[in-house]
Amino acid sequence: MQHQDVLRRPVITEKNTRLMEQGQYMFEVARDANKIQIKDAIERTFDVSVRKVNVINVRGKQRRRARRQGRTASTGWTPSWKKAIVSLQEGDTIDLFGDFY
């Protein structure tokens, strides 16, 4: 797997912006990527030193889609995905709003 295929997108939420102040960044990654591949992809893409990588598999949630009156509602699932929380060495930062896209 090439390092360009590992990173999908940065996950930007309120919690993650607080983590950025501590030198931790969250990314959606390929489901078959491991910690070594994620670390290598971050270091090559952003030219930083990675201290630690935590990986979490996020299960999809069941969702209901309402239909018109008189018909039954259908249910489906959102897709499962994998996220990685990457801790950087002291002094390293990633400008997600300018470097990634």
Image: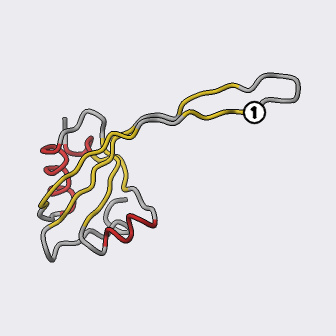
Residue 43's spot in the image, x, y percent? 15, 57
Q: Nearer the viewer, residue 74 or 45?
A: 74
Residue in the image at 12% along x and 44% along y: 36
> On screen, 67 above or below 87?
above
Residue in the image at 30% along x and 39% along y: 30
Q: Splitting the image into 4 quarters, where does residue 71 fall?
A: top right
> On screen, 99 above or below 60?
below
Residue 56's spot in the image, x, y percent? 30, 44
Q: Amino acid at mark 1?
A: Ala
Q: Which residue is situated farthest in the right direction here? A: 70
Residue in the image at 34% along x and 66% along y: 96
Q: Which residue is situated farthest in the top direction here? A: 71
Q: Is residue 72 left or right of residue 53?
A: right
Q: Nearer the viewer, residue 95 or 17?
A: 17
Residue in the image at 16% along x and 44% along y: 35
Say what secondary structure mark 1 lies in.
loop
Quadrant where the C terminus sits is: bottom left
Residue 18's spot in the image, x, y percent? 37, 71
Residue 69's spot in the image, x, y percent? 88, 29
Q: Is residue 56 left or right of residue 76?
A: left
Mark 1 crowdedness (10 Å alpha carbons): few <14, some 14-19, many ≥20: few
Give the total of numbered labels: 1
In the picture of the structure, the residue carrying the numbered disc 1 is 66
Colouring used for the render: secondary structure
Quadrant where the N terminus sits is: top left
